[in-house]
Amino acid sequence: MKSLVIYDSYFGNTEKLAQAVGKALGTAKNVRVVRVVDVTPAELEGVDLLVVASPTRGFRPSEGTTKFLNSLPANALQGIKAAAFDTRIDPETLKNKVFRFIVQRGGYANKAIAKMLANKGAQVIHPLEGFYVDDSEGPVSSGEMERAAKWAAQIKNG
Ligand SMILES: Cc1cc2nc3c(=O)[nH]c(=O)nc-3n(C[C@H](O)[C@H](O)[C@H](O)COP(=O)(O)O)c2cc1C
């Protein structure tokens, strides 16, 4: 099975998690982990499983992620299984209750990514995931790297 993990990352947290997911999906021979700005259309050829990862920025995926997914031709992902995760701040760690409410109500990037993947013909695998960072710039919260590896093993069989 050939897998491709496409990620965006401003501070390196989503990148670390994307690498962990890639490692759990298989060997370097079968798995490529590529930053979204570096993806070429040829990279999608022969891919069985596509994972798209983005930091949540203003309740949405990063601009680069959205731009890339929107740029794909219609049905470009036909026949491809696809999964999505985002990174986010754990709302429980936000002291300001109003801010916490807004963040929770605003939603997260993974759903929007899944919608775009489906729009391009991919068969979206669930569960979608969100992994926590301690603060905007990180680090990745304790235990989340391990949880990401477990999630990857799960979607690999999905
Ligand atoms: C401008 C900006 C907007 C953000 N918006 C959200 C948000 O809506 N919800 C959330 O949980 N985290 C939000 N965050 C925190 C990011 O999710 C966090 O910076 C990201 O997960 C870190 O990943 P990265 O190192 O790969 O960029 C925001 C951070 C920034 C800087």
Image (spheres, rainbow, N blue to C red):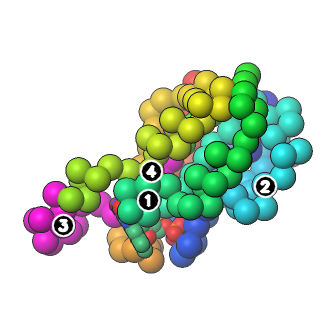
Q: Quadrant of ligand 1?
A: bottom left
Asked whether residue 97 is drawn in magenta, I would say yes
Q: Residue at x 53, y 60 (%)?
A: 62
State which region is magenta. 85-101
* N-terminal label among 1 and 2: 2
Residue 109 shows which numbered tag?
4
Q: Is residue 113 above or below residue 158?
A: below
Asked whether residue 54 is drawn in magenta, I would say no
* Residue 27 visible (yes or no): no
The residue indicated by pointer 2 is 39
Where does the image place residue 93, in percent across and percent down from the top left? 22, 67
Q: Residue at x 29, y 53 (%)?
A: 106
* N-terminal label among 4 and 3: 3
Helix, strand, or loop for circle 3? Answer: helix
For marks 3 and 2, give the CA distance. Answer: 35 Å
Query: In the image, is 76 to the left or to the right of 83?
Result: right
* N-terminal label among 4 and 1: 1
Query: Along the line of sight, which residue is nearer the eye, 116 or 9?
Result: 116
Q: Which class describes the residues within 10 Å of circle 2: few (<14), some (14-19), or many (20+)?
A: some
For marks 1 and 2, give the CA distance. Answer: 20 Å
Q: Which class describes the residues within 10 Å of circle 4: few (<14), some (14-19), or many (20+)?
A: many
The residue indicated by pointer 3 is 99
* N-terminal label among 4 and 2: 2
Q: Residue furthest left?
A: 97
* N-terminal label among 3 and 2: 2
Q: Residue at x 44, y 77 (%)?
A: 137
Type of the residue with mark 4: Ala
Instruction: Mark 1 and ligand 1: say if the CB distance to the nearest ligand atom is below 8 Å.
Output: yes
In which quadrant of the rendered view does residue 84 lie? Answer: top right
Residue 56 shows which numbered tag?
1
